[in-house]
Image (cartoon, helix red, strand yellow):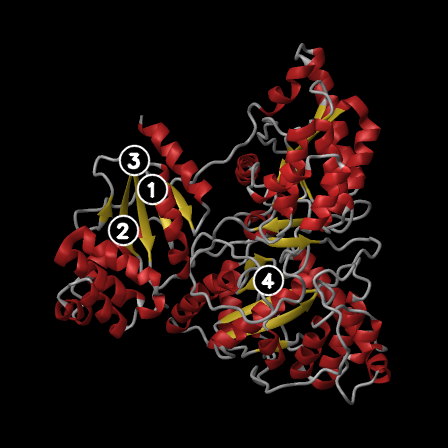
Amino acid sequence: MLVKLFRIGFVTALSAAVACGPAPTPQAASPGDGSQGPADQGANGAAAGKGAETAGRGGDKGAGAPRAAGAAEGDGERALVGGAEDDNTGNGFPVRTVAPAEVGTWTGGTEADTGEGAKSPVPVTAADPSWGSPKAPVTIVAFSDLECPFCARAAGTLAELGRIYGKDQLRIVWKNFPLVFHKNARPAAETAMAVFKLKGSPWFWAYHDALFAGRLDPQVIDGSLPRGITRKFVDATLASGEIGKKLDEDIELGKKLGVTGTPAFFINGVHLSGAQPVDKFRAVIDEQIAAARKATASGTAPEKVYAVLSAQNYQKPEDRPGASPSQAEDTKTVWRVPVDGSPVRGKNTALVTLVMFTDFQCPFCVRVTPTIEQLARDYGDKLRIVYKNNPLPFHKDAEPAAELALEARAQKGEASFWQAHDLLFAANGKLAPEDLEAIAKNLGLDVKKASDAIAKKKHKARIEQDLDLADDVQASGTPHFFINGRRLVGAQPIDKFKALIDEEITKSEALVKKGTPAAKLYDTIIKDGKAATFEKVKAIPAFTKENPTKGPTNAKVTVQIFSDFECPFCKRVEPTLAELDAAFPGKIRFVWRNKPLPFHKNAMPAALAAMEAFKQKGNDAFWKMHDAFFQDQTQLDRAGIERTAAALGLDVQKVLAAIDGQTHKALIDADIKAADDASISGTPTFVINGYLISGAQPLSKFKKAVNLALKEAK
């Protein structure tokens, strides 16, 4: 991308748990207050369109596993292209002085796509603004909106990726996807494409940067034009209608590809949704670089690599692993979503139970609140509403607000919770400590107790229980609804809710007529509903005495760790594994399986050194070297390994000889083959008594797998 973007270096707020790809540190400042989420995951408004935010709590299936980030890993807000009033308040953008766009040193090259990119299922042509070479092994196609703050944040991540990989390894292609409720998005896109037509990609990206540098309005659109380009020139360029047609084609292509919001990316055809952390992009990019090398080695011309790999990788929206329910439009499956002591509005004899996972700082949750209120009025005793906490990690004020609402319930009962609920959403995102204190006073709470509850996270267990359930039922974004167990995602129009509610009323009335007690209706309906399951991995060759282990040999649970010492996600998960061990004392045996990835140049030498440490002094020396390597991954070069070996009292010359002579490569290759045979392609990956966990997942996911394994082991 542009040099200016490298200077701006917008912060990518999420620190999602993902799988391998080394992680640089994004630079400098955020475009806003840093509390908004990174991607769009839903639709535009309660009255028109939809909207939802996603959190990305879990990890990827590994660096080598192309997959959609989507709901499970996608982060932020999403908005469908559909009619809606403009609701943009400029959240996430600073107010700034308007200045003309300026091109810095252009690093993106001058080559144009010769037509090979058009053969991809995610086609790109010379008519698309781009950065980087069409012969690059990886192409990122970005569907974006110049008024979307999450697109601005993602632009900084793309700039960072451009800096890391350079134009010969990475190409970035722009596609227009202006959302209809962003009234300035389409005019900005048209103007940007006019700049592209008049002056080419370098000036397009310069103008793109200028538009993303602050809140967008007509003055910014015109005032940021590069010197020498006037509105008159732009209007003359737009007059032919060619640019308008191009925008429409981009939007239609996005819809066809399953893009429902912005930003959305296709990395050599692999779908990634939202302003994800740079690490998450790198996990896919690094895997695709490796795939491209294989393709070129087998005779594929570099300029054809994108079309070939994207055709292999691309999956239809409904077929994507981890695709969000909104993408698959699955409103038929019934999920087991228990009430389980959550705040309730309505009677337990209601014909329909609506469970909502929500976040007090999420703008789409704010937007849908009047819809839920209207439903409560329209259906009366036929509808019960259940609240579940899902404060997204990038909303810094969401969890404190949830604590306050639960404390209101603790102090003054269910009615007080719903009063707090209404006041918190009425605050429209203003949830700083002083705002929460004012709400506590308004509710007549003991303010000191409320403040202490927030500070000490008194209701953390309840919130985590809800988060755990959200993970189980794949409610990765907010707002997220289950109507008698049937999923509805985002701030949907009221008619969407009513269609499902009316269907469920009819079904429930039939059950009551057949003798189901009204108070047992909901439990009966969800009893056989879908619940979380863990994937079973193919049988893998058993580990041997040559594999380093930690923990009791007679433990009922074995956690096999396929890992890479240079992988940042492998490092990230280490504290989680320590917590897991502490949570199940004496019940887990950990087994190390080497999987150094080929694009990590220091991973294999580090693995060879660690195995030599194991040979010299057993498990104790191996795990000490393991800890040292993960403590500082910058010390994995030869000199760093030598220092570590010396500090551990090892025979340094034998360690270096083991690296040079690849003494333990056969053992490492056996682990790699075991992983490959089980379709384990990325790191970190874990096999827990046969159950597979991919990526640096949260502790809760590991605990579930261990509990399941323990239950089966009895």
Q: Are marks 4 and 2 in contact (CB under 8 Å)?
A: no
The answer to whether residue 583 is left or right of residue 372 is: left
Separation of residues labelled 1 and 2 (CA atoms): 15 Å
Q: Nearer the viewer, residue 7 or 712?
A: 7
Quarter of the rendering occupied by the C terminus: top left
Q: Identity of the amino acid at label 4? A: Phe
Mark positioned earlier in the residue sequence (1 or 2): 1
Q: Is residue 487 visible?
A: no
Picture quadrant of residue 509: top right
Q: Nearer the viewer, residue 357 or 308?
A: 357
Q: Identity of the amino acid at label 1? A: Asp
Please tell me how crowded label 2 is: few (under 14), some (14-19), or many (20+) other residues with Cα within 10 Å. Answer: many
The residue that disc 3 covers is 587
Mark positioned earlier in the residue sequence (4 or 2): 4
The residue that disc 1 covers is 581
Picture quadrant of residue 381: top right
The residue that disc 4 covers is 265
Q: Position of residue 385 (x, y in %)?
A: 71, 30
Q: Position of residue 372 (x, y in %)?
A: 77, 36
Disc 1 vs disc 2: which is toward the camera? Answer: 1
